Image (cartoon, rainbow, N blue to C red):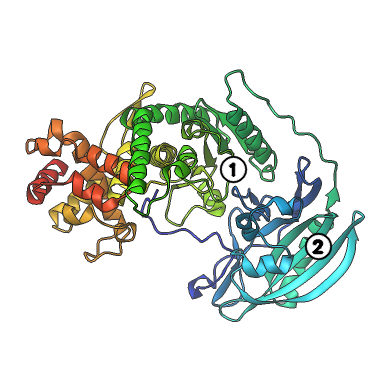
Amino acid sequence: MSKMTPPTRSIALALIACAALASAASAQAPKAGKFFEDSVDLGFKVKMPDKWDFTPPRPGEKNLIGKYTPPYTKYINLSGTEILWLEAYLIKFDRRGEEEQSAREEALGTESLMEWIESSTHFGGSGYRPTREKETKVSRVPATEYLITGTGQGGTEFQVYAMVYRLQPEVDVAVVFDGPGGRTKWRKYEGSFKRMAKSFKPIEVEQLDYSGPRSDDSAYRSRKRAQLEKEVALSQGGKNPWALYETPNYFIISNVDDRQFLRELQDRIEAIRAVYEEMYPWEQADRLRLERREREKEEKADGEDAEPAEERDAEEEAGDDEPEVGRTAAAEATPRERSRCSVVRVCAKQSEYSEYGGPGGSAGYWAWVHEELVLYDDKAGGGRGDTWAVLNHEAFHQYIFYLYGKLSPHSWYNEGHGDFFSGHEYKHKRFVLKPFDWRVRTIQQAIRDGKHVPLKDLVRFTQREYYGNNKYGVGGGQNYAQGWSFVYFLRTGKKSSSKWNKAWDDVLDVYFTTLASTADLDQAVERAFAGVDWNELEEAWKQHTL
């Protein structure tokens, strides 16, 4: 969900040109901190930078074990025009069971250190060349020490230090650090990196103490819980440990150290789900899926080039498409059961959210590929009111995904409804509909200035146009506000607008049911707004919004 604020730094470790930063304070060489310990999978421990923030891997990442970044000043000055973002990585090259991996899974990972450095987004330089490669042993484990030189975009060299441990015949583990070029500056960093690299020790792999199935569990939920418990156990490298919480319909992973906040989050997400279910009932989704299958059977019988309905049955039952990468691999679970096991990750602060993968300028996102909703506790920024607004918005996208699969409505409908739910106010353990204050003033000003997008065009905007690349030159922030206001009008105008036309009563229902049963965006718009007088509709919407 976008707050339409200036974008944050990319998660990539990159060299950037910025003369204004030349005189800024620079991060210091890190000291060795506590051990990162993996006693449930690979069996090792190694010291990593002291007091640095730990970021766990996203679902489906093949190489990354974890990433460390400084909590405050995150870069060093390389020259008068370049800085280098400091990060430390724990990575693995795990060849166990490779014959069972899909081509897609293999494509996500690399097989060697140099391949990882050159192909990953973690380093923004180029021309990487090993300048030292030394065979050694660390705690009796065969290892190779590397010093690699890279070149930044402005031509300034920087260094990458790595130690690759051959932990098992089919498993290598590595620590990777970056630092400045130049012998004097680099010496301080290299000494610190070496001390951490030489702290590596193999340890015994212990059986994880799973909580086990509950009396009302489905088999799928039990497997999901066990999978997430293992993920959490492997994510304990930072100051704030990650923990798993559970509600009837959600698994929540968070490193927020505030029990009251976490209790409220659990109550809120179940309460807003009740609102989703009332507006988008599962029974309707089942009916629309059946209608779609019947239509496809008819098209096949007529000789049209349609995917056979019987071949789509399993696909529909898995939520329209199996995720390419992520946690879910159990096709036998129904969409409804998968929805009851929805995953929400709440980072303790914005910087951790950004490092984990949060897009610049966003406050939360739903990653359907990973089947994970991600946001952060905004207590230190805009306040927790912003956190709750983002939760309601993104949880709607998550709910609709399981309800209808990878259904992609026009952005005015999709994002407009996300913001529609963001405006709901939480009182006495339930939600009450209110206008969404993030958007109200923006669209009111646009209407007064005559700079809003005509509704007949807005409803056909592609996502690209909605985000700002449109002939009107209207940016994404205003389009989000207009999309919200139009949905709010169509949801509430019947009772509150003196200019309401009963012909608009079913616009939203017709749009969505048509799209769900046909997957045709143009047809959904045409049916929903058939016979509508756009001038009349726009005047009524403007009056209602102002």
Residue shown at the point (57%, 38%) measured from the top left: 254
Q: Residues within 10 Å of mark 1 (few under 14, many from 20)?
A: some
The residue lying furthest to the right in this view is: 140
Classify residue 341 as left or right of residue 46.
left
Label 2 belongs to which residue?
Answer: 194
- For the residue carrying disc 2, how many other residues have a C-alpha within 10 Å: few (<14), some (14-19), or many (20+)? some
Read off the residue under disc 1: 327
Mark 1: secondary structure: loop
Q: Residue at x 85, y 55 (%)?
A: 169
On the image, the x and y values in percent for residue 385 come to 39, 38
Residue closer to the observer: 466 or 518: 518
Q: Are marks 2 and 1 in contact (CB under 8 Å)?
A: no
Residue 367 in view: yes
Q: Quadrant of the C terminus?
A: top left
Nearest to the observer: residue 154 or residue 185: 154
Describe residue 89's horizontal placement relative to residue 16 as left or right: right
Q: What is the count of numbered marks?
A: 2
Q: Secondary structure at mark 2?
A: helix
